[in-house]
Image: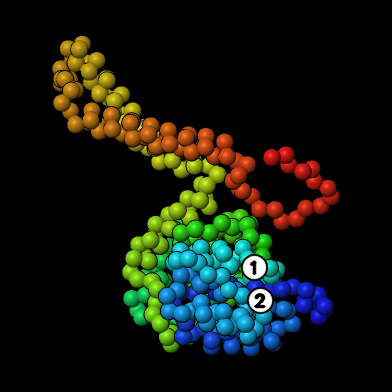
C-alpha cells in the first residue's frame, strides 16, 4: 500500500468518557503520539456520557488544542453502549477503534491492531492476558468469557476487553443498546465478519474508580442469553420455542393418553383401574399440554411478527455488489 492510499484511509478512535477528567490529558497526549507515528490521518471522538467531574470542559480544551479531537456530550448518563453508538455514528474513518478512557488501554498498541487487521480480518478484539484488577473481578470475568465462548461459538479469551478495532462497515451495520457493546465481536461473527484476537498490555488504573460492580455479572449472564437467542434463533424463533414447548406438550399427551385408557378400562369394569379424577398425573399432564401449547403459540406469534417486519430486520450482511442493482421500492 503506497503512502497516498494509506493517507486516504482515516482512522477513528472512539473513547467513551464517564467521570475520567484526571486521565483525559494524558490519554490525549498518548493518542497524539500514536497518531503522529501513523501514515494514516486520525480523528479522536470523546463521548462524554453524562460526566459530573468537569470532563466535558477538558474535552473542549483538548479539541481547541488539536483539530483531530472531537467531542460529543450526553445530557445525562445513558451507558457505554449508547456512548459507543453515538461515536460510531459520528465516525468518518474506514477503520474504527474503541478504547476506554481510564488509561488501562495503551494507545501505543494501535499499530499492532492495524497490522492484525491487514490479515483479512474485520474485527480485532483485545486480550488482556495479564490484568491488574482485583481477583473478585478477574475470576468471574474468566468464567463469563468461557461461558460466552461456549454458548456463541466464538472462542475469545476476553470478550469484555474494551480495546477493539473494526472495519467501519461493522459498526455502521450493528445497532447497540443495553450492554450489547461487549458482544460486538459475537454479533459480527454471526453475520459473517472475520474476528481475530490480539494480546494487549493492560495497565493499572491510576485515577478514578471502576464503574462496574458485582451486578455487572448478573446482567452479563442475562445479556449472554439475549445475544445467544438473537444470533442463533433471531430469524427462526419458533425453532427454539417450539423445540422447548414440544417436550412438555408430548409428555402431557402421553399422560392424558394413559389416563384415557385407564378411564375406558375402568368403565368396562376391568379390575385394577379406578377413577382418574384424583390422580396427580392428570394435573401434571394438563399443565404440560397447556405449557407446551403456550410456548409453541408464542413461537408462532414471534414468527408472524418477524414476517410482518422482515423488511426492517437485517438478517444478512452484504460483502460486495457488482453491476447495477434495481432500487428497492419502499
What's the residue at 60%, 41% (across, down)? 310
Q: Secondary structure at mark 1?
A: loop
Q: Are marks 1 and 2 in contact (CB under 8 Å)?
A: yes
| The label number, if any, that marks residue 216 in the structure image | none
What's the residue at 33%, 35% (across, down)? 291
Near-viewer residue (112 or 256): 112
Question: Could you say where residue 121 lies in the image, as x and y percent from the top left?
Answer: 66, 68
Question: Could you say where residue 95 lies in the image, as x and y percent from the top left?
Answer: 67, 70
Which residue is identified by label 1? 91
User: How many numbered marks appear?
Assistant: 2
For residue 40, say whether it is visible.
yes
Q: Is residue 83 above or below residue 253?
A: below
For residue 196, say whether it is visible.
no
Near-viewer residue (110 or 30): 30
Which residue is identified by label 2? 43
Q: Quadrant of residue 326?
A: top right
Amino acid at each position: 500500500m503506497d503512502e497516498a492510499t494509506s493517507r486516504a484511509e482515516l482512522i477513528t478512535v472512539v473513547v467513551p468518557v464517564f467521570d475520567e477528567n484526571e486521565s483525559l490529558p494524558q490519554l490525549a497526549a498518548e493518542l497524539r503520539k500514536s497518531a503522529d507515528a501513523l501514515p494514516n490521518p486520525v480523528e479522536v471522538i470523546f463521548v462524554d456520557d453524562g460526566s459530573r467531574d468537569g470532563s466535558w470542559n477538558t474535552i473542549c480544551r483538548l479539541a481547541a488544542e488539536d483539530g483531530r479531537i472531537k467531542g460529543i456530550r450526553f445530557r445525562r448518563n445513558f451507558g457505554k453502549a449508547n456512548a459507543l453508538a453515538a461515536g460510531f455514528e459520528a465516525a468518518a474513518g474506514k477503520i474504527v477503534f474503541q478504547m476506554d478512557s481510564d488509561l488501562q488501554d495503551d494507545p501505543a498498541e494501535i499499530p499492532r491492531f492495524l497490522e492484525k487487521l491487514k490479515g483479512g480480518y474485520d474485527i480485532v478484539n483485545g486480550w488482556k492476558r495479564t490484568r491488574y484488577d482485583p481477583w473478585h473481578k478477574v475470576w468471574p470475568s474468566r468464567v463469563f468469557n468461557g461461558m460466552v465462548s461456549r454458548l456463541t461459538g466464538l472462542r475469545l479469551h476476553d470478550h469484555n476487553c474494551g480495546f477493539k478495532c473494526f472495519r467501519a462497515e461493522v459498526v455502521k451495520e450493528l445497532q447497540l443498546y443495553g450492554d450489547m457493546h461487549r458482544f460486538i465481536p459475537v454479533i459480527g461473527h454471526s453475520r459473517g465478519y472475520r474476528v481475530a484476537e490480539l494480546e494487549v498490555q493492560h495497565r493499572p488504573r491510576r485515577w478514578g474508580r471502576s464503574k462496574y460492580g458485582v451486578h455487572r455479572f448478573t446482567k452479563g449472564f442475562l445479556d449472554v442469553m439475549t445475544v445467544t437467542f438473537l444470533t442463533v434463533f433471531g430469524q427462526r424463533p419458533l425453532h427454539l420455542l417450539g423445540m422447548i414447548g414440544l417436550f412438555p406438550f408430548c409428555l402431557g399427551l402421553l399422560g392424558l393418553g394413559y389416563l384415557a385408557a385407564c378411564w375406558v378400562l375402568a368403565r368396562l369394569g376391568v379390575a385394577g383401574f379406578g377413577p382418574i379424577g384424583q390422580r396427580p398425573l392428570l394435573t401434571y399432564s394438563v399443565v404440560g399440554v397447556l405449557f407446551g401449547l403456550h410456548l409453541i403459540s408464542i413461537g408462532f406469534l414471534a414468527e408472524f411478527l418477524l414476517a410482518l417486519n422482515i423488511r426492517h430486520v437485517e438478517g444478512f450482511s452484504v460483502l460486495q455488489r457488482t453491476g447495477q442493482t434495481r432500487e428497492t421500492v419502499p
